[in-house]
Amino acid sequence: MKQMGVSIWKSSISFSDNICVKDGCDGITTFIEYNDIIRINFEDEATVLWLNEHNYLRVPNASFTKGTYENFILFIKEKTNL
């Protein structure tokens, strides 16, 4: 069967005054406040930022282009008070 319309799904997440998520091939942007995060899971390969019981952001630990994963841990704990 021939695949049609298949493309690579790209997303980027940036952290500053809020969390900016640019998602998909069409570049839809969503802004999330740090106080919207209810739980953080630190896993071997990714950090999971939970927005509710069904929605989350998965941030690969090796994906940082500015700063380090260790700096991110301190930053996200401070911003979320979690």
Image (tube, rainbow, N blue to C red):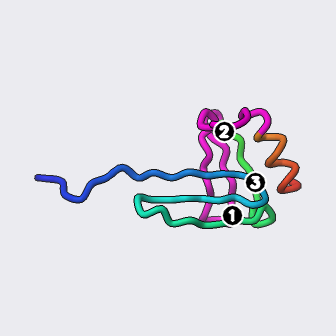
The relative height of residue 73 versus residue 5 in the rendered view (above or below) is above
Which segment did they paint magenta? 44-71
Circle nearer the N terminus (3, 2): 3
* Figure quadrant of residue 57: bottom right
Does the segment drawn in magenta span residue 59? Answer: yes
Q: Residue flagged by tag 3: what amino acid is it?
A: Ser
- Image check: 67 left or right of 58? right
Q: In this view, does 46 lie above or below 1?
A: above
Three-letter residue code for mark 1: Leu
Amino acid type for the residue under numbered disc 2: Glu
User: How far is mark 1 from mark 3, CA to CA?
Assistant: 17 Å
Q: Which mark is residue 43?
A: 2
- Tell me which corner region of the image, top left, top right, bottom left or bottom right, holds residue 71: top right
* Residue at mark 3: 16
The disc placed on residue 51 is 1
What crowding class fits label 2: few (fewer than 14 Cα within 10 Å), some (14-19), or many (20 or more)? few
The image shows residue 6 at horizontal and vertical percentages of 27, 54
